[in-house]
Image (spheres, rainbow, N blue to C red):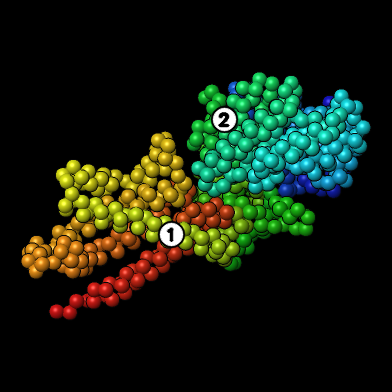
Amino acid sequence: MSPFLDALLDSSLDDSIRGVPPGTASLRLRDVGAQGWRPAAGDMALPVLTLDEEAFAANRDLIFAYARRHGVALAPHAKTPMAPQIAAGLMEAGAWGATVANLQQAAVLLRAGVTRLILGNEIGGLASGKRLGALLAAHPDADLRAFADSPAAVETLAAAARAAGRPPENPLAVLVEVGAGRGGARDRAAVEAILTAVLLHPGLLVLDGVATYEGAVATSDPAETAANIATLMQRTAEAFALVRSLAPERPLLLTAGGSAFFDMVVAGLAPVAETDGNATLVLRSGAIFFHDHGVYERALGALDARRGFACGGAAAADFRPALRLWAEVLTRPRFPPGPAPVGGGADPAGAGPRHLRLRHARRLLRPGSAPPAANPPRRRGAARGWAAGDPAERPARLPRRAGRPGTGRRRHRRVRNLPSLHLHRPLAGAVRPRRRRAGPQRLPHLLRLTRDGPASMQTLNFQQLWRYQDQLIDGTLHTLLLTLVAAAIGTAIGVAAAAAVRSGPRPVRWAIRGYVELIRNTPSLIQLFVVFFVLPGFGLRMGAFEAASIALGLYFGAYCTEIVRAGLDAIPGSQVEAGQCLGLTRWQVFRHIVLPPALRSVYPAFTSQFVLLLLGTSLASQISAEELFHTGGFIETRTYRSFEVYAVICGIYFALVMTFKLLFAAVGHLAFRWPVRR
């Protein structure tokens, strides 16, 4: 253990530190474990954040196994826990190094004995360069690599190297950062300018490789995200080739990789490092070691869906949340029921309790109830606690007697929230719940935490959606545009196909009938998936909106074909013959004799099909097309107000349908003089 960590363990704690029980005398940090404090037992002053060491170790072993299997190295980002003991432990477990975000984090890890660092951000101007130089001078054994995305950033690093007083044989290593959306060089010219600036400082700076961060180009569209990351990886490989041309013998680094898309980084850059033969691909993933019940649970679920976690029989779903937040319900208004404030330390200034923006508590503890096991059994896909107040669960039975553990059956359910939340309610242990079946009268015993704060299950709140009005408007406009484009495509197909069925050659008529039967007798969702997922395999790549437009246009065209054909067939042949006898041309017969009554007969069916098409655009959300229903899903993941969100979405669809119905009725009345008076 380094002297810094040893001195840190000898530092004193008292009850002025959050989490230490009131009245505790001063004690050394290394003696805390011997006190036997347990948040579940009510010993500690809440809130307290604890680490599940078993889950952390399992996550560590899993990601290290993935790295070994794919021949990559790991430099975990230390900003996630900012605990030097954890960073040192990961180095002992086989990490290549550690990543830091700023000079303060670098100073902590260097004092803890972690000397191989990636400084994963530009640090600012010349003043910051001098501070970095002072840090390197204080730690001459530091093996640090710094990002540079411009000639100005290179000058800052040169100033740091001068201030550090490093010998010419030990220059400061520079990683050329390629990026988009955040920092990083945007094009080849910017990369070449960085390389030229580094070469102007021989003995101070040396080219050491290329860095990037793929999370900066991620969007809500999985296909667009994959395309953006692929493009970024290609640009990174091109920049690496330029660096290699200037440093043909030096071992170089390729570094990227957050905790959500590292599989795409490995797929894009591992072949580059392998072909080079003298390069190392380093992933900087940090949050993967801790996981959560929210952002990263969804991200790793998507990773498994695209089969990106290739590691023997393991899956990304095997990662487990390792952090637990223990908090206390401070009060619970009953008349009328209202939000229950939780002292979760959400206020960074410590000014007082604030509503935790979480959807559910993972477990609800009362005095006398059994504390959770240290390492409870876990099956894949199941959460470790009880999702109190989940609308989909049955009412929970309370224990028959206070103090008797295990008498209540509680349904386990994975929920979307941040690290596991355990609540400790200050109720008298002598209070015994009455032995009666759970029902509406028992609802005060169930607590629901919504993402925007605790709320009773009877409370509706539509005001939160007001801040998303711009997204709702954009989603509505995209839905209208998608409907109109698909209707235009389908109408053109329907008119042309109906005309071909009436007068085209037999093979054409058979082909059109086959198309109509195929579209009308298969699920439209499968048709959408074929266009979006299957056609790219034949080289026909398109975005989500274009794929949805084509698929819905084909769907609408099949029904429009039958509608138009029925309208044309409804015209008696005698009327056509009469027009020909009067000397009218074929176009005049169609224009004056066939078309007006045909339009009149097909107009109601056409407008009804248009309304069905409008409602059917919601299927496009399944391929992440940014229409109204997709927007609703996006808002629901931010607010966790499912009923309110989808009630508003339903209202918008209803308003659109009624508007089009009134518009079509007005057009029909003006064009066809409806209703007909006999």
Q: Is residue 558 left or right of residue 271?
A: left
- Whether residue 6 is situated above or below residue 24 in the rendered picture: above
Can residue 400 be seen here? The reply is no
Residue placed most toward the observer, 586 or 594: 586
Identify residue for label 2. Answer: 267
Q: Residue at x 77, y 30 (%)?
A: 207
Q: Residue at x 88, y 41 (%)?
A: 131
- Going by the picture, which residue comes out furthest to the bottom? 677
Q: Is residue 45 left or right of residue 228?
A: right
Identify residue for label 1. Answer: 481
Residue 559, percent from left and from top:
26, 54
Can residue 624 be seen here? The reply is yes
**Local crowd at mark 1 within 10 Å, few (<14), some, or many (≥20)?**
some
Q: Residue at x 66, y 29 (%)?
A: 241
Element at badge 1? helix
Task: Identify residue type, mark 1.
Answer: Leu
- Whether residue 510 is situated above or below residue 614 in the rendered picture: above
- Whether residue 422 is situated above or below residue 453 in the rendered picture: above
Q: How far apart are the alpha carbons under marks 1 and 2?
A: 36 Å
